[in-house]
Image (cartoon, grey):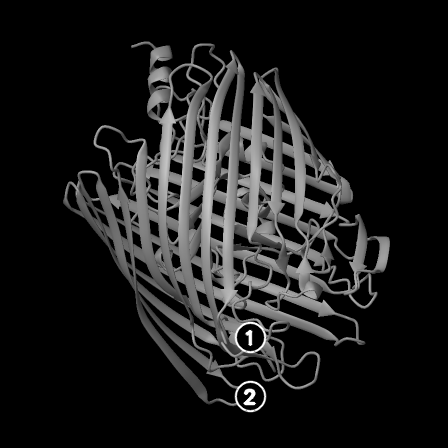
Amino acid sequence: MNQRSIIIVLSVIFPLLTFAQERDSVIPTHEHSLCALDENTPTFDYIDTVSTISEVSVYGQRRDEIVPSQRLSGKRLESLSSFSVADAMRYFSGVQIKDYGGVGGLKTIDVRSMGTNHMGVFYDGIQLGNAQNGLVDLGRFSLDNIEEIALYNGQKAQIFQPARDFGTSGSVYIRTRRPKFEGDKNFNLRTTLRGGSFDLINPSIVWEQRWNNRVTSSVSADFTDASGKYKFRYRRLLPSGEVAWDTTAVRQNGDIQSYRVEATIFGNTSDGTWNAKAYYYDSERGIPGAIVNNVWKHAQRQWDKNFFLQGYWSKYVSEKYRFQVSGKFALDRMRYLNPDSALMYQDNRFNQKELYLSTAHYYEILPNWQVNISADYQYNTLDASLANFPYPQRHTLLTALATQYEYNRLRVMASLLGTHVWDRTTMGISVDKLNKTTSRWTPAIYFSYKPFADSDDISLRAFYKSIFRLPTFNDLYYTEVGNSNLKPENTHQWDLGLIYAHDWYSGLLRHLELKADGYFNLVDNKIVAIPKGSGQYRWKMMNVGKVHIAGFEATAEAALRLHRDWYLLMCLNYTYQSATDHTDPTDNDPYYGTYGKQIAYVPWHSGSVAANLNWKDFGVNYSFIYVGERYHTSANIRENYEQPWYTHDISATYSLRYRGCKITLGLECNNMFNQQYDVIQNYPMPGRNWRGTLKLEF
């Protein structure tokens, strides 16, 4: 079989989204994810680039994936008009990005209205932690060194993983690029320069080196500098419908200056793989603040320094048994300054430390039955410059038993997670130690079934998962706010889904994939902040919340070969959500009551459309995002109403080669129709803005 035939066969087996330039090659289907070599191999565990056809990049998604997931990778990820991981995740269904505006504004994710703190964010297979407030700012992760972003509802679709991977209501997996080399080439060098609106300057560099057949490395760095200034129109109406004010202003104090340096070593042994990573991020940013009471400029500043070392080792002992060991040490420092004494002068410093160790053991009982036992230990501390701060320490032990079984067309995956937590604090200047213990066992079970013996095109899936999240250190101990008696938030998730996918070898339509999921979630003991006394800054954290969430998600993808080298990929996402407050049945006042009303910032309808047209080395990309009407509190009254917003983005890229260097030019226009909108009330977003890109690859 010649090389051309091999390419065609691989294109049929693994749906492609590589835009091959051979006229008779199969049209690329979809580039959702880089195929794992083994369905039980962790996302950060890949064999190095030993291949007899290294010039072929194979992409695809296992259609029978038992856990509902969404992925962006490769060329499709590059084609989106996205600056950070948070921007790219806007195209996933069921996702709400809380964006406080501008390049430097905080960006967090909420999936299926479970709450931001219920999401686990994993970077090359190990979770990013924040014991202080539970938030991970997705805006700090540039896409220059990212190979894939995957979103799972529940947990990842495999059992061979650390115990902590079973411990969230939803998971985001960010996988950085692993070096790949063509032929005898031993290094790759990629430099990128971006510039555009908001006085943005963003250079980056990635150097990849192959030291021998077993060891490769990658070093990447980027720098971001932006003033964050942009014009916006601010318009508000009175309850009567009359215009209260209508003005145009410039967003202030949204500047950011940051840099990131990251180095990773990848290694293979005769019976396993390993890697080690060092990461450092440093930023200073202004906090633009909310526009209220005719105040247009704020002076708050924030400094962040994030550092971690992490490593991983996996060994194949036999065909039936393998194990993995991973670990991490993280040090996070944050300074918050509010120099405005008219509000409340604050100059607070926080230092977090985290130590994490994990081991997982996988055994194949039968060819169709596997089990895994995982155990993790995590230690967190928090120091702060606040008066009478209790200096909390948290020891967490996680144990997980998971199994996967396959019989004919039925696949079942089940897990049981044990969580044991010991909190230890020193209250104020006292030497007395306060201890608090929490222990829970939480199950999850997933099903996948193919109803037709003669076709793999249609499959059904369902799952149930129970999990909880502990209060953060801020929830428990923040001065004048924390409540040390808080209970964990509990969640219960149910999902039922259907997927249809088919490939064609010829004709206009080459790939079609349709997915639909209905789900119902319960959240109780929800942790909320309520006023305490009459002071503006006197609040108390309480377990008073209960939320019922019912939703429906649908995704459609189509890949077409229009003519010879003309390829078109289209993707449509739609989400409906009813997320209602069921905390207090007596809170049913028809005007101010919140019982049975939609919770804050959750739209009933949202969706996105993305299209990618390619001809040889030229590409045009269009995307549309829509977020429907919603309210900024659970009192669904006219004064709290937030209008729908939508944006149209378009970009174009062109690549050429000159003396062994691949040069890529890109131009983006975001929010091309200059819509004025807020994601969070009183935090206006940018209007029309531009970005240009120059990329050199050696």
Q: Which structural element holds mark 1? A: loop
Q: Position of residue 251 (x, y in %)?
A: 79, 54
Picture quarter containing residue 237? bottom right
Q: Quadrant of the N terminus?
A: top left
Q: What type is the residue that disc 2 sits on?
A: Ile
Residue at the spot of label 2: 429
Measure how far apart labels 2 and 1 are at the Cα level.
Answer: 45 Å
Look at 74% across and 40% down and name the residue there: 689
Image position of 174 (left or right of 106)? left
Picture quarter containing residue 243? bottom right
> Is residue 130 something one can see in this rendering?
no
Q: What type is the residue that disc 1 sits on?
A: Asn
> Is residue 635 something one can see in this rendering?
yes
Q: In this view of the protein, which residue sits in the foreground, 2 or 367?
A: 367
Q: Position of residue 497 (x, y in %)?
A: 36, 45
> Which mark identifies residue 588?
1
Q: In this view of the protein, which residue sits in the foreground, 128 or 412?
A: 412
Pick out the residue farthest to the left.
Answer: 366
Q: In this view of the protein, which residue sits in the foreground, 71 or 6?
A: 71
Q: Position of residue 510 (x, y in %)?
A: 43, 21
Which of the two discs, 2 and 1, labels the residue nearer the N terminus?
A: 2
Look at 65% across and 81% down and name the residue there: 538
Q: Residues within 10 Å of mark 2 (few under 14, many from 20)?
A: few
Q: In this view of the protein, which residue sits in the foreground, 565 or 359?
A: 565
Q: Residues within 10 Å of mark 1 (few under 14, many from 20)?
A: some
